């Protein structure tokens, strides 16, 4: 069995391994832990942190030797720490709408500062439409943390769940980017639109490239499924379509790469005063 396949199997059992990612998850205090194991040779300060986490979450586990960690996790990459995670606590539709309303109120009360620098950005959300690869989802979350989005919205069907594999791929960003899981993405987009959020879709069918669109506004951008792109009912709700020019033999980019390209262009426009991209809408 290959390394990637073996790791994927371990992730299905919800094991999160690696000293830094586990400790970061513990410090974030968001994701419940069901079992926690650590090696006898770890530094005393790290062991104390792990004992406190075990007490907080009332989870099974404790000290064991490294061979036992390897046996439990199925690989030797654990760096002396292994945790079995519970269900990730995503926000729901109600908390998403609270998040949107709060972000939009920031514009109305302090609009003179919005868009002047990275700390006072226009509100930005990412909507993942049936992203099924955990590595893609984790990489998208990592970019979302990098550009400081207000949150990421995922559906409840045909969507990779928030798992340890996603956490590792996100380099820990899963603990810091608000994630909302809703039963109907179309309804969430309708409600966001009614509050004043512009809906943008990443689509190669658009006649306008992403750098030809003025993007200094409250924005939710949809990243579509790896194979099928954005679902038609969501595509119909887009106010803006953004295409990434492809001049080689391959017709499209990986979903996470496309997200990175588009999100940083959005922030580039929003963090600088532009005069050549058209009047901001």
Image (tube, rainbow, N blue to C red):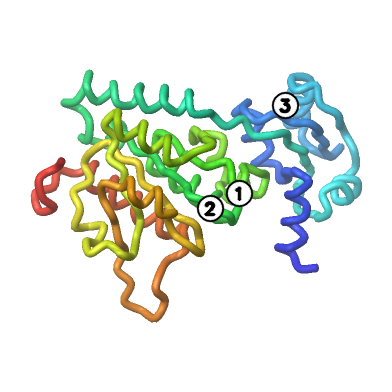
SS at badge 3: helix
SS at badge 2: loop
Residue drawn where x is 54% and y is 50% of the image: 137
Mark closest to the chain's N terminus, 1 or 3: 3
Mark closest to the chain's N terminus, 2 or 1: 2
**Vertical arrangement, residue 80 with respect to residue 95, above or below:** below
Does residue 148 appear in the picture of this structure?
Answer: no
Q: Position of residue 16 (x, y in %)?
A: 72, 43
Q: Which residue is mark 2?
A: 131
On residue 160, the disc is 1
Crowd rating for badge 2 (residues with CA inside 10 Å; few <14, some 14–19, many 20+) = many
Q: Is residue 57 left or right of residue 31?
A: right
Q: Which residue is mark 3?
A: 49
Asked whether 88 or 193 is in front, the reply is 193
Q: Position of residue 73 (x, y in %)?
A: 82, 49
SS at badge 1: loop
Separation of marks 3 and 2 at Cα, in angstroms: 34 Å
Asked whether 22 or 199 is in front, the reply is 199
Q: Position of residue 54 (x, y in %)?
A: 78, 25
CB atoms of marks 2 and 1 within 8 Å: yes
Does residue 26 appear in the picture of this structure?
Answer: yes
């Amino acid at each position: 069995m290959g390394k990637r396949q073996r790791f994927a199997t371990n992730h299905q059992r919800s094991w999160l391994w690696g000293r830094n990612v586990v400790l970061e998850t513990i410090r974030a205090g968001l994701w419940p832990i069901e079992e926690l194991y650590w090696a006898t040779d770890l530094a005393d300060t790290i062991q104390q942190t792990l004992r406190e986490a075990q007490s907080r979450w009332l989870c099974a586990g404790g000290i064991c030797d490294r061979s036992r960690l390897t046996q439990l996790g199925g690989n030797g990459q654990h760096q002396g720490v292994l945790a079995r995670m519970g269900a990730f606590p995503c926000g729901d539709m109600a908390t998403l709408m609270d998040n949107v309303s709060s972000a939009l109120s920031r514009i109305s009360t302090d609009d003179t500062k919005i868009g002047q620098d990275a700390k006072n950005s226009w509100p930005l959300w990412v909507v993942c439409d049936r992203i099924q690869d955990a590595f893609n989802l984790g990489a998208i979350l990592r970019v979302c943390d990098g550009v400081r989005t207000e949150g990421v919205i995922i559906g409840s069907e045909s969507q990779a769940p928030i798992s340890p594999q996603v956490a590792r791929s996100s380099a820990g960003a899963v603990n810091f980017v608000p994630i909302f899981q809703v039963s109907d993405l179309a309804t969430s987009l309708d409600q966001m639109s009614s509050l004043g959020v512009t809906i943008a879709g990443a689509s190669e069918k658009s006649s306008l490239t992403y750098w030809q669109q003025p993007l200094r506004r409250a924005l939710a951008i949809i990243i579509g499924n790896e194979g099928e792109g954005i679902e038609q009912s969501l595509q119909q709700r887009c106010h803006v379509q953004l295409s990434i020019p492809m001049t080689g033999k391959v017709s499209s980019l990986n979903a996470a790469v496309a997200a990175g390209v588009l999100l940083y262009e959005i922030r580039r426009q929003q963090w600088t005063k532009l005069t050549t991209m058209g009047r901001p809408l």
